Image (cartoon, rainbow, N blue to C red):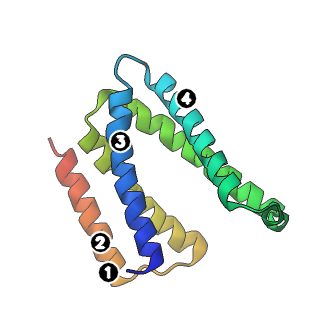
Amino acid sequence: MERWMFFATGSMFFAGVTAVLAKAGLAGITSELGLVVRTLFVCLFIALFGLWTLRPSDFVALTLPNLLWLGASALATAASWVCYYAALHVGDVATVALIDKGSVLVAILLAWIFLDEPITWRTAIAAALIVAGLLVLLRR
């Protein structure tokens, strides 16, 4: 398995674990409070990760465009998490997590439009299957 696939699979696994743990952690509190507490823990863990892995010289490579794009990404992440936790608070984990993974479709389209990444037949078929799965899930 290529290294990037190992990390992508880890991301998939931990995202699934996150949803179940978050739902359990929201018992008896608002989704907003749960999100704030979780995010503070994430900040702490990522700061510790940075202290462990980064060298001071790494920061020299940062440019204004890096900061602007990463800041915009953080804003999108925050919006995603606010929506995710609000949905998770009242919805069931499986449904919320499956709908959330529809973000793959958004990522494919935006990468094609803005990053000139190709949409191959394999990608298009996989995206169509995701759409079909979402339609099955949302059909009442």
Do the residues bearing badges 4 and 1 touch, measured as CB atoms within 8 Å?
no
The residue at the point 82 percent across, 64 percent down is 63
- Identify the residue at the far front of this view: 52
**Rendered location of residue 46, percent (x, y):** 61, 48
Q: Which labelled disc corresponds to residue 122?
A: 1
The answer to whether 105 is drawn above or below residue 125 in the figure is above
The residue shown at (39%, 83%) is 120
Q: Are marks 1 and 2 in contact (CB under 8 Å)?
A: yes
CA distance for labels 3 and 2: 23 Å
Identify the residue position indicated by label 3 in the image: 19
Describe the element under mark 4 as helix, strand or loop: helix
Query: Which mark is drawn over residue 36?
Result: 4
Residue that lies at the very extreme toward the top in this rendered image: 28
In this view, the mark in front (3 or 2): 3
In the drawing, what numbered circle is on residue 126?
Answer: 2
At mark 2, the secondary structure is helix
Specify the amino acid type for callout 3: Ala
Which labelled disc corresponds to residue 3? none
From the image, state whether disc 1 or disc 3 is nearer to you.
Answer: 3
* Mark 1 and mark 3: Cα distance apart in space: 28 Å
**Nearest to viewer (mark 4 / mark 1):** 4
Q: Earlier in the sequence, mark 3 or mark 2?
A: 3
